[in-house]
Image (cartoon, rainbow, N blue to C red):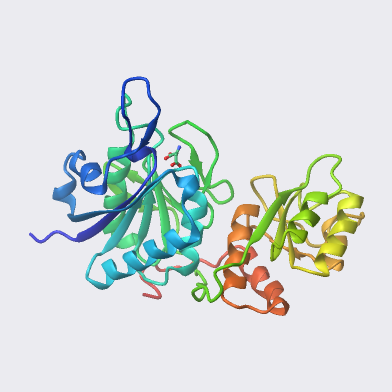
């Protein structure tokens, strides 16, 4: 029987990290072939090709690295892979997944996975996560869902996933709508159909920088203004509650907004910014009247990536509000899993 073909590429991260000597800290050393080689039964599930693209801790991955990975993944599905899997560090996984999802326009699943424990740890989770990622990559139900994160036998949509624990095996959650699916006895299943996902044109300008600044207690927003003075092209404010900042911060947002776009997202880790509930100075109604854009359901980190992608694609400032509104809403789900592709 012919097995479906799945391409795996490794980028580094804990899943690949070993120590040079006893007691030393771990660094990325293992390549994709080595990661695949220790997964029992992997080659019975799919015909695997494995390459090492990078060997980095994920905090040092860049947008350019990810665009390279995107080209690699496109080439693999164009050559016949039913899905592709990238292994990487978990620290930035929620951001890299969302970044790739902004551009991934293929029906084949692009799966990201990693590990919370190093390969030498007792009960290392890397091999199980890699097997689950490949099982997810070959499942017909995974098509049309864009970029997925598979960790701990749970499947998350890039749009919603977040790393919510520094070390636990259950670090990845989708706080708003819950996980997209789960694997049971090696078979992935989904709780609902795929969502419609707008995709963005590739970057025309590679130098766009978007700052993200958290609004804190007794905070006048000076850092946000310093970011603009330092040359950032836009600012995302991780605002309090449903999109709120102090009186002084609100004044600052008016000033900053004369120079660059300002987006207000909620720093709470879940839920949407409000639109027309609170009437105090520094609340969502006031900030929108000052020209700030509201991120809706997008987390500050994801709003930053979206804003950067829109600006890098050459979108004029006047159109950003409309686009953010669209992305910030809850997506429509495609009722039939096969629809659209
Ligand atoms: N703790 C990280 C990991 O899970 C390190 C990194 O992100 O590279 O891989």
Residue beneath the point at 86% across and 67% down: 289
Q: Quadrant of the N terminus?
A: bottom left
Kindly give the residue lying farthest to the top in the view shown.
23
Residue beneath the point at 37% across and 61% down: 69
In the rendered image, residue 301, in percent from the top left (x then y), is placed at 61, 53
Tell me the quarter of the picture where residue 251 sits.
Answer: bottom right
Horizontal relation, residue 233 to residue 218: left or right: left
Relative to 230, residue 155 above or below: above
Residue beneath the point at 79% across and 69% down: 259
Horizontal relation, residue 260 to residue 121: left or right: right
Tell me the quarter of the picture where residue 264 sits.
Answer: bottom right
Number of numbered discs visible in the structure rendering: 0
Residue beneath the point at 32% across and 40% down: 16
Given residues 142 and 323, the one toward you in this image is 323
In the rendered image, residue 241, in percent from the top left (x then y), is placed at 76, 47
In the rendered image, residue 195, in percent from the top left (x then y), is placed at 49, 65
In the rendered image, residue 266, in percent from the top left (x then y), is placed at 71, 51
């Amino acid at each position: 029987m012919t097995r479906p073909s799945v391409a795996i590429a490794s980028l580094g991260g804990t899943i690949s990290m070993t120590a040079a000597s006893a007691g030393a800290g771990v660094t990325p050393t293992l390549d994709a072939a080595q990661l695949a080689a220790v997964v029992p039964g992997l080659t019975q599930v799919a015909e695997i090709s494995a390459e090492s693209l990078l060997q980095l801790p994920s905090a040092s991955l860049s947008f350019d690295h990810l665009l390279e990975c995107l080209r690699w993944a496109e080439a693999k599905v164009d050559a016949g892979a039913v899905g592709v899997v990238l292994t990487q560090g978990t620290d930035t996984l929620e951001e890299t997944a969302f970044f790739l999802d902004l551009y991934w326009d293929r029906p084949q699943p692009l799966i990201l996975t990693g590990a919370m424990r190093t390969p030498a740890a007792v009960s290392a989770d890397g091999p199980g996560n890699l097997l689950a990622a490949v099982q997810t990559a070959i499942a017909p139900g995974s098509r049309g869902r864009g970029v997925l994160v598979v960790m701990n036998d749970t499947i998350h949509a890039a749009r919603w996933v977040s790393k919510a624990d520094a070390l636990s095996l259950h670090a990845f959650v989708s706080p708003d709508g819950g996980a997209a699916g789960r694997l049971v006895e090696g078979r992935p299943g989904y709780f609902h159909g795929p969502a419609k996902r707008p995709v963005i044109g590739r970057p025309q300008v590679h130098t766009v920088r978007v700052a993200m600044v958290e609004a804190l207690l007794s905070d006048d927003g000076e850092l946000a203004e310093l970011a603009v003075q330092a040359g950032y092209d836009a600012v995302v404010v991780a605002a309090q509650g449903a999109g709120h900042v102090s009186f002084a911060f609100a004044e600052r947002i008016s000033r900053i907004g004369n120079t660059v776009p300002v987006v207000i997202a909620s720093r709470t880790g879940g839920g949407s910014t409000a639109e027309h509930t609170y009437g105090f100075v520094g609340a969502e109604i006031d900030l929108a009247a000052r020209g700030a854009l509201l991120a809706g359901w997008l987390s500050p980190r994801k709003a930053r990536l979206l804003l950067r992608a829109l600006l890098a694609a050459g979108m004029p400032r006047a159109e950003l509000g409309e686009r953010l509104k669209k992305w910030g809403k809850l997506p429509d789900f495609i009722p039939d899993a096969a629809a659209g592709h």
